[in-house]
Amino acid sequence: MLRVALAFGLALLFAFPAVADEPFRFDDGDRVVLLGGTLIEREQKYGRWEEALVAYNAPRNFTVRNLGWSGDTVFGESRASFDAPAKGYERLVTLTKSLNPTVIVICYGVNESFDGDAGLERFRKGLAKLLDDVAPTKARVVLLSPPPFEPTPGATNVAARNADLAKYTAVMQETATSRKLGFRSLAAAPPATENGLHLNDTGYRVLAPLLFSTTVAPVDAPALRAKIVEKNQLFFHRWRPQNETYLFGFRKHEQGKNGAEIPQFDPLVVKAEAEIAVMVKALPQK
Amino acid sequence: MTRWLLLLALLTTPAVAVAQRDAKIPDPDPEVERKTFIVPEGFEVNLFAADPMLAKPIQMNFDPAGRLWVAASEVYPQIKPGQPSIDRVLVLEDTDGDGKADKTTVFADGLLIPTGVVPGDGGVYVADSTDLVHFSDPDPATGKARKKRIVLSGFGTEDTHHILHTLRWGPEGALYMSQSIYIHSHIETPHGVKRLNAGGVWQYRPATQQLEVFAKGLVNSWGTAFDQYGRSFWTDGAGGDGINILMPGVYAATAANAPRILGGLNPGSPKHCGLTVLSGRHLPDEYQGNLITNDFRGHRVCRFVLKDDGSGYVSQEKQEIIKSNHPAFRPIDVAVGPDGAIYVADWYNPIIQHGEVDFRDERRDKTHGRIWRITAKNRPLAEKPKLVDAPVGELLNALKAPEQYTRQMAKQLLKERGVKAVLPELGAWTAALSGPTADALRLEALWVFQSLDTVAPALLDQVLTSADPKVRQAGCRVVAAWGDKLANPLALLAPRVNDDHPQVRLEAVRALAAFPQVGAATLAAQALDKPLDKWLDYALFLTLRELAPVWLPQVQAGAFDFGGNVSHLVFALQASGSGDVVKPLLALARNAKLPPAQRQSAWKTVAKLGNAAELAAVFNEGNQAEPAGYWPEVMTSLEDSLRTRKVGAVNAKAWAGLTAAVADARPAVRQSALRLAGLTKSEEVRAALETASVSVNSPDAAAAAEGLVSMGGPKSVAFFRKLLADETPAADRKLAVVALATLDTAAAAPLAATYLATAPTAPGLADIFGAFLSRKSGAAELTKALAGKKLPADTAKLGVQAAKATAQPDAKLIDALTLAGSLGAAKWDLKGDELNKFLGDVAKLGDPARGEAIYRRDSMNCLKCHAIAGAGGQVGPDMSSIGASAPVDYLLESMLLPNAKIKEGYNSFIVTTADDRVFNGIKVRETKTELVLRDNENRETTIAVADIAERRNGLSLMPAGLVDGLTRQELLDLTRFLTELGKGQYAATPGKVVRGWQALTPTPAMYEILNRQRLAAVATSEPGLLWNVAYSQVSGDLPAGGVPEFNWNRDAPKLSVVRFPLEVTAAGAAKLTLPEHAGLTVWLDGVPLEAAESVPLTLTAGPHTVTVAVEWAKRSRPLRVELDEVPGSPSLAQQRCPLGSPPP
């Protein structure tokens, strides 16, 4: 255990000297995995943040795998499907590890925050456990805290919601500090949500600069963004295909043979990424 | 593991090859399809739209402009790698009003299997895989939406015919959406994360983003509809209950963690998709308010007529709106259009769904689709309303239209116009209402207020006090929705809980669940002071259970007791289902001032929920002397608890009373005491158990043996071993073998093998195999013991049958039995050319009539597990129209390899408990504490979840090899019969033909009884007669030879006697129709009736029995009995299918 921790610390120390200042600075060959709830899940459909990351890091080449799942928490609550809740968490960790990431971005806290003070310690422990469980990847971890709730018709207690949320984001920040992890906060985000909670295309665009501590020029590369979205969709079909019940679940003895199609998405993802790499070269280089 | 691989290898190769070679693609000409349609007299069907205007429609809804919005998917069932997600939302328009669409607009594309579409809020809501999205802002040039907004994310996609679907607006402006059984959804809203694992209905209010689970359950709920008064219904595309009541908060069949399940209105009426309520001037009077849904499997557009029945309904299926034998006609959605005609979406596909047929089967149609339009001949169409740009005043007046379409669209538009535009006129419009329709219109106005999120207390009060109960019941749901925005909501509901009309009471009771206050519970319980039918009982159960976190702690603290009303408290405590209720219930049970029925109920509930000491208190203090079944029922509850729950350490001394009870004069008490003695390990009683267990042919012997098994320990083992070593009579040795198999499986196996080798074959020997198969090591031990043994062939067959009937048959045991019984291995194994030849011969050489006779053979056991139109066992799927939906290769494979494709909901579980007992069955329901399985004998078993050590998915409960005994011709005939089911003369017609019977089975006791009491005794509830279940043929006829025939006396004619139970919910007149009455003698509840073509019945509410004696020699045709209404009579009589063999 000590050896693992030591190795992890060393990796941080030598490979990523600029972690604390600029957690979203990536290196050539980095494999980035995004974890979180709806905020992360929907980003794959708009591609605004990934576009900003690509532009910021150009010409360095890295890959992004979005594992966001609506309603999810540090406990993997949205991922159990037919199984017991513990299996959902196991799936979160196993899938993350299987992607062999060098960077893991974790954006949780908003769903957990509905539990208020009563859930705070559970969240702290859950986050710590998740970090411990993905530590064997030796990936650099970035904690991203969610933007605040905004007033919306029907939601009458936004101030209380945000007071709770602030406590949860504070836990994320404390955890990042004590473990020397990257941390960015979206707490100071300008009003940008569509429904008080989630971002639309404009919202992701407006919040994208907050990922970086330095001021970055806004990017708008529609062709690149479309290719990113296409890549994300192909990867989504790969890791969260429809009809899981038949393909890999308890009815696979019937139509499981169709599961052979799913790995066929892999080369398509790789191809889309190769096309993204070409597009990156055309971006303004720093 | 090896077996699994083998099985998979077996089923992949032939199925794929055959599926392609056997493809039967019908002529796609819509006119060819239309000509197959049979419609009721006075109706006609025209083609509204067809490919290439649209392909593969899934859901449709009209908009206020009269345009038809259609969600269509060519990608279904699964996107291929590299395939773009090309699915679309289409808008179909009939611009010239000729009843045919002449314009298609692609409003949105790039979708992934969109399964729901409903226009509204300035655009259209679409169910798009994981998301609910809203498209709007059409490009004036192309009509295509320019704006896309993701509304909700996180819907599960575990099965693409279960994903988010069936989008419908409620009358109050909320959006209702369904998901089905395999789906797990996790939706973030500003009010928190909402999760729904398994099937159910969501209710979403876009304006406030409130998302709630409105109902849970059903397998695949593709139909939701509201009637004029907001009464809601739903249908199940996979379940079997026809129309279901969509009660707020209901747990319907299959619901996860269901404390109790509410069944549907038409048991035995499977597979209904899409639902609408008919209304409007175009349709004849008798069609108003009818519910229309589709049997896509049987190519039928079905019509149900609902009549109020207490707080619920009686639902009767009438002649279909469309009936067809076209193999690709797949009606899946239905709506009434702006012209008052009925529109049906026809998915058009020879293959339905993708669970059982390969995703890439080439017979899957990807390019066709139709919308059919059904009109009444010689009746004017409804005038299409002009709503879109109408001023608010006109929209309000549109609420007066008899067409629900017009009212619903007007409400949609009023909601979109907003508070500022609508409220000023709405108040004045409402105030000016008068005349007989005023109350119904006030309800419409109330819904407009609700959709505008504006509370209108005075109007609500008017609605709640309307003279029309249908209006009053609707008001209750509004009270729940407005909740604490109302000054005193409980005061509004109080009179409604005590309303004269049970439907109003039901809605008021459910509305109270929205108020987490002790006062709401007190009020809800008042519903108990008036008669409680099953729906109201269910509603009250739900409400008190949901409110339990508020009132239960108060009861436990002694601060609250439902105003001292004992029956209220008992009901509430039972509803709460919490172990914390035992102490107050025990106090009630001990209260001698209570009526016996309430005390018994309290004792039973304590027995059901209490700990070991409390169970002993029930036994010692219960009213043992109460007459009839009072005390045995309490004792059975004690047994059940001790057997299936962890009740804590049992102190045998507290059960000293058993010593006397095992000698009680009442057999039921005595036998229960023998079992309880074992369960409580009352060693003091052991000697009595041993004596009782060896008393030859005594009905107590089995109970005593069971007691000794429960008591366990070396003494029990030694006792049974000694018994087997001695020369005891054969019948009791069987009992001993069964007992020992449970106590010491290894020791029992050789003794069992020896016994089986010599005992005469009798059906009862199956118990021995059952005993071994229900032990973890049983099959292995028995296999070992059978080595080198010879068994009588029929005994070995019993063993093979028992082994095959388990969820994971033990191949080694089957081999050992086959060898020991020299059974040989006559097994059907069709492959390659042989298989193709066989499939080709089904249509050429198979005879469906002979096939039906084979299907009905006792030895085939088909009827035991499968129902046709509700008649038959409930273990396997209903077969009513299987031939119309399943390809022949699939049907054959299902018989040869029952485990190859298992219908959803019919995969079995194998549960092993901590004490090594093994249970097989299909899950009926599961709560946090109990798992209920149904086995292949149609028996339900409750297992304590805490006791479960392991659970695995098993195979199908259908034994493999059922058809092994058939010749090739017989198998061809049987397959042909199955392919015909749902078609032509093999389509089970709806209506009231009696399909489920009990047939009198001759026994020595029967001859004695009839000779003493004469034939009329068969129409009495004489307990000595043995009745077995029998079923009519698909046609509804009960043929001679299908039931036992006998001469009960030398001089009496040869005859059969059958009977069926009737359930009457409203007293009045009904009639029996007997197409041929020659040779029939008919009794109603023992009173002889004159047999005639039409036999009038005068029925009181409650259960009745009709008995018919049939002299076949006097008849020219099979027996057929139809139960019909008498026009004008309120009588609501329904035949209930008998399920078991005991008398009703």
Image: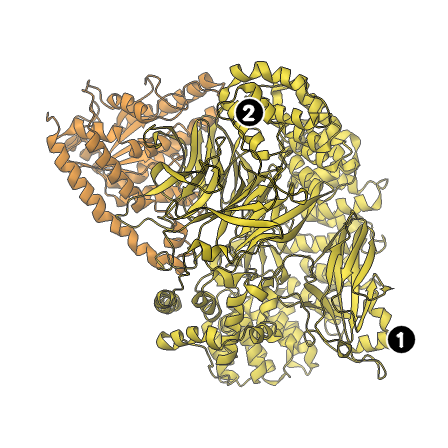
Chain colours: A orange, B yellow
Left or right of B990 in this view: B902: left
Dot 2 amino acid type: Ser
Query: Residue B379: x percent and y percent?
Result: 61, 42
Q: Earlier in the sequence, mark 1 or mark 2?
A: 2
The image shows residue B636, relative to residue B230, as above or below, that is: below
Q: Foreground mark, 1 or 2?
A: 2
Mark 1–mark 2 Cα distance, whole angstroms, equals 72 Å
Q: Quadrant of residue B397?
A: top right
Comparing B658 with B549, the one in front is: B549
Q: Give the number of callouts.
A: 2
SS of the residue under disc 1: helix
Query: Residue A126: x percent and y percent?
Result: 39, 34
Comparing A176 with B530, the one in front is: B530
Dot 1 amino acid type: Arg
Pointer 1 local density, CA inside 10 Å: few below 14, some 14–19, many at least 20: few
Left or right of B383 in this view: A127: left
Q: Chain of mark 2?
A: B
Q: Which residue is mark 2?
A: B451
Pointer 2 local density, CA inside 10 Å: few below 14, some 14–19, many at least 20: many
Question: Is residue B515 among the parts visible in the rendering?
Answer: no
Q: Are marks 1 and 2 in contact (CB under 8 Å)?
A: no
Residue B1012 — which label?
Answer: 1
Comparing B1108 with B1129, the one in front is: B1129
Determine if marks 1 and 2 fall on one subunit.
yes
- Which quadrant: the N terminus of chain B? bottom left
Q: Quadrant of residue B878?
A: bottom right
SS of the residue under disc 2: helix
Query: Residue B635: x percent and y percent?
Result: 75, 55
